[in-house]
Amino acid sequence: MLEEIDEEELLEEEDEENPPTPEMYEHHRIEADSGQNLLRVDKFLMTRLPHASRTKIQEAAETGNILVNGKVVKSSYKVKPQDIVSVVMSYPKRELEIIPENIPLNIVYEDEQLLVVNKPAGMVVHPSYGHYTGTLVNALAWHLKDNPLFKDNHDPRPGLVHRIDKDTSGLLVIAKTEKAKTHLAAQFFHKTSDRQYVAVCWGNLEDDKGTITGHIGRNLTNRKVMACFPDGSHGKHAVTHYRVIERLGYVNVVECILETGRTHQIRAHFKYIKHPLFNDKEYGGNEILKGTTFAKYKQFVNNCFGICPRQALHAKTLGFEHPTTGERLSFDSEIPADMQQLIEKWRNYIRDREE
């Protein structure tokens, strides 16, 4: 029995103005038959996954991407009857030409194995329907045009390990070798990477710290956005931890830490608790949700929308283990200018109101 599972923990979906594209990795779940003879797991998988080479399978085993009955195994493990084998592998390459473009990149770290970039809001991560040029991958194809992983312009997602939405800014790690890609993907899958976001949400949260738990899945009436299903009737398990950094009257600045990595997780979870992110048009945050009815206040908020014309969400920190040295790398980024100006404008509003 072979079951393919859409593994959103590895890759966050692109901004969904257009139809979604498949993830770069797929999670297979295979249950061995009751008559299964003892067989090495790498050979077992080669017979079940026609698009995967033995090298790819062995790399997956080396980086902890092959599990049997929920436990990580080596490629020499002998599969027994009724064993449940799970594996995360790269998808076969897709026929979509990538045009290298000389687009400036904000590179905060780079070595022979990987690079970390600080993506600006408004940049799509990879080409898709309606976004064939001007993406992060187009820029990477130019920057890494001599890298074997990026030379084949038919793969739209070389080196990508995770994504953030088009209008979310912040840190992303990109692999420069197949080994690094597999190793980094395993960390995202096993939740050993660290990611912290900063957001501005509507309303004054009741508690200084909290956890939002609820399945995230496609909205049943609008598949361009996600929704929270707290009863678990749809979607996949998702957990977001938050801490209030600053209370600014009708909005709060919050720190968010993801325990899972579902599509639009922070945005959908804060919508669910009735505190959508400021100016998040897909989740209702582009309306005046809190405050007074005075015309002067409405003008103030509209000016704030103009200062930060996107959801106020930034992937601020990123941490992971280096794929070859084993060193723990941690990166921090400045909150971008539009969000800083937005926060400062609310600070001034609160100060003037108190005076």
Image (cartoon, rainbow, N blue to C red):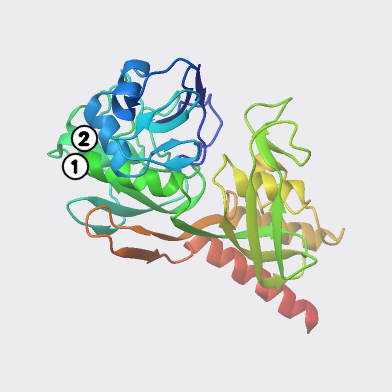
Q: Are marks 1 and 2 in contact (CB under 8 Å)?
A: yes
**Residue at figure coordinates x 37%, y 40% from the top left:** 73
**Residue at figure coordinates x 28%, y 22% from the top left:** 97
Q: Is residue 206 left or right of residue 35?
A: right
Residue 90 position within the rendered picture, expressed as x and y whole percent measured from the top left: 34, 30
Q: Would you name the residue on which mark 2 appears?
A: 150
Residue 285 in sight from this viewpoint? no
Q: Is residue 95 above or below residue 341?
A: above
Q: Would you name the residue on which mark 1 appears?
A: 144
Separation of residues labelled 1 and 2 (CA atoms) = 6 Å
Residue 259 position within the rendered picture, expressed as x and y whole percent measured from the top left: 57, 53
**Residue at figure coordinates x 63%, y 54% from the top left:** 240
Residue 111, numbered label:
none
Q: Is residue 148 left or right of residue 56?
A: left
- Corner quadrant of residue 137: top left
Q: Residues within 10 Å of mark 2 (few under 14, many from 20)?
A: many
- Corner quadrant of residue 320: bottom left
Q: Is residue 109 left or right of residue 282?
A: left
Q: Amino acid at mark 1?
A: Leu
Question: In the image shown, does 48 or 293 lie closer to the viewer?
Answer: 48
Callout 2: SS: helix
Q: Is residue 216 left or right of residue 310?
A: right
Query: Nearer the N terminus, badge 1 or badge 2?
Result: 1
Question: In the image shown, does 349 or 95 lie closer to the viewer?
Answer: 95
Q: Residues within 10 Å of mark 1 (few under 14, many from 20)?
A: some
How many marks on residues? 2
Callout 1: SS: loop
Residue 111 position within the rendered picture, expressed as x and y whole percent measured from the top left: 19, 56
| Extreme residue toward the left, this view | 146
Q: Is residue 64 above or below residue 151?
A: below
Q: Amino acid at mark 2?
A: Phe
